[in-house]
Image: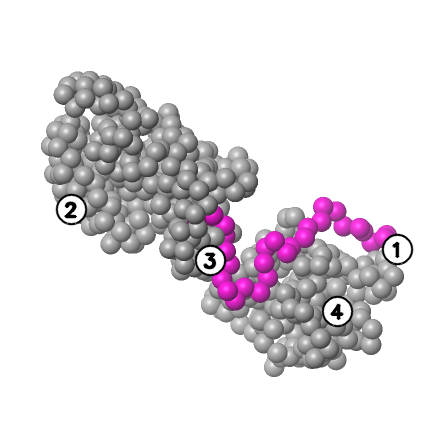
Amino acid sequence: MTKNKTAHILSTSLVKKMMKDRAIRTSISKESFLYFFHFYYAHYVKYETADFQKELFHLLESNPKENLYVVAFRGSGKSTIITTAYPLWAILGKQQKKFCVIFTQTRVQAKQHMMNIRTELESNELLKRDLGPFKEESDEWGSFSLVFKKHNARITVASTEQSIRGIRHNEHRPDLLICDDVEDVQSTKTREGREKTYNWLRGEVIPTGDRNTRLIIVGNLLHEDSLLMKIKTEVVEGRSSGVFKQYPLLDRNDYCLWKGKYPDENALEEEKKKVGSEVSWQREYLLRIIPSDDQVIYPEWLQYYDDLPGENHPGYRGTYIGVDLAISSKEAADETAIVMAHVYSRSEKLRIYILPTVISKKLNFPAQVELIKEISTTHMRKQKEGEIFVESVAYQEALPQMLEHEGIKATAIKPKGDKRTRLSLTSTAIKSGLIKFPKQGCEDLIKQLIGFGIEKHDDIADAFSLLINALMAKHSKEGTILMMWVGRYCDESDIVYYNDYVDVE
C-alpha cells in the first residue's frame, strides 16, 4: 500500500484504525467513494490525486441516478476508477446497487475487465472479506458475472456484439450501466458504424435498465459524429439528462491537469516521446478530434451565415443548382443528390450561399424529372440568371435534354478527374469564406464533406463539387479561375484551372 501517496486523502492514523476495525472502515468507505478507493485501491495510487480525479469521485458518489459521460486523457485513471472500482463501491457503499452491467466493444475486452475485478477481489484480503464471498458465473446471454450473495448483487460484463434484452438478476433489472470504450477509430470511420453504436445504446442498452438506472459512458472523442459527441450535443442542448465532463491533459491555457504525475515540461515531453505519434498525442491526450491523413475538407474551415442577403440584394445573380444523378432506385444504390445556392457578385467578388434545402433521394428517371421541375418552379421562378448543372454521364445525358424540352434551363456537365480531386478544388473557396453554409439544414452535406472517403455515401458531396466548380468556371473571367492547392506556396507551374476538371457544354 502506497501510504505516502494516499496521505493527502487518508491520514496514517485513520488508515490504521480502518485496518484494525471492520466496522470503522465499512462505515467510512460506504459514505465516500473517494475514501473507499484510497483505502482498498491504495496500491493504484502512485501519484498525488489530481483535482479532476477528486471531481470525478464526487460526481460518481453524489447522485446514484445521474447519468455521467466522461472523456479523459489516456493514463488518467478513468477506467480504473469508473470501471474497476466504482461497481464494487456502488454495491458495498451507500448507493446499494444490485445489478451492474459493464459494456465493452469486444468480448476480449469484456473478459479483461472481469479479470481485473476478480483479481482485485481475490488478492485484496480486506476487500474480499468485506464484500465477499463471491462466485463467478456464465449465463444464458454468454456474458460473464460475479455474484455477491451477501448483498444480493451482480456485476456482469458484456460486449456490443451481444444482445442482452431482458437480462435480470433475480427481481432486479440493471440499475447501473457502464460503457467503457465501446467505440474505436475504425468503428467511427463510417456513418453506418457510428449510427450502429448510437442505435445499440438507445435500442439495446438503455431499455435494459429501469426508471432509476444510472448510465455512465467512458471514452474518447474520435469523430465529430461519434457516440460521445452526439451525447455531448444532446446534453448541451438539454435533450439528454446528465453531466458531460472532458479532461484533457493540458487545458486551454496549457495548464497540466495532473501535476502529481507530470510536474514540469520535461515530464510532459518525455510522455509525448513515449507516445511517438503526434496524431495519438493530440487525440488521446489533448482530446482533439483529428481527421484522417487523407481528409479533404476540415470542419474548422467552414463558415456559416445567419441570414441570406436576399433576392433584392443588388449583387444577387440567381439560384444555381447542382444535380448528381443516381441510375438505380434500389436500396443499396446511390441517391440522386441536389445542392442549391444563391450567388452574389459585385465588383468581381463572388459569394456563394448554400441553401438549407439539400435533397438526397432514391429516384427513378421520371421522378428525377418531376422533382427538378418542382425545384425549378419553387426556387428559380423567372430569374434572369440561375441555372441547373446536371452531371452528364451515360444515360444521364438525357435528363438535361428532357429539362430543356420542359422549358427549364439546364446545363450538362462532364466532370473530369476523380471525385476527390473535384472536391479538393473547392477547398480554398471554402476556407476563404467565399462559400458560406447555413447553420441548420446542411448537416448531411457537411458530414459528407468532412468525412469524404470514409462515409458510406458521397452523393451530396459530389453534387456540391459539381455545383461549385461549374459556378467558379462560369463566373470567372473567360471561363477559367486560378486555384492554388491549400497549404502550398505555388508558382505558375502549380496553377490548377477549373476548366481542366469541368467541361460546360
Question: Can residue 331 be seen from the camera position used here?
Answer: yes
Residue 414, horizontal then vertical, whole percent? 67, 79
Image coloring type = one colour
The answer to whether residue 288 is above or below residue 63 is: below
Left/right of residue 179 with respect to residue 124 in the rendered view: right
Q: Amino acid at mark 1?
A: Pro
Within 10 Å of disc 2 (Cα), the crowding (few <14, some 14-19, many 20+) is: few
Residue 449, horizontal then vertical, whole percent? 58, 61
Q: Which residue is mark 3?
A: 278
Label number found at residue 314? 1
Left/right of residue 368 with respect to residue 260 in the rendered view: right
Whole-number angstrom distance, CA of label 4 to CA of label 3: 36 Å
Whole-number angstrom distance, CA of label 3 to CA of label 1: 49 Å
Q: Which residue is mark 2?
A: 138
* Disc 3 to disc 1: CB gap under 8 Å: no
Q: Residue at x 33, y 37 (%)?
A: 47
Viewer-side label of 2, 3? 3
Q: Amino acid at mark 4?
A: Met
Viewer-side label of 1, 4? 4
Q: Residue at x 75, y 69 (%)?
A: 472
The answer to whether residue 74 is above or below residue 175 is: below
**Element at badge 1?**
loop
Whole-number angstrom distance, CA of label 1 to CA of label 4: 20 Å
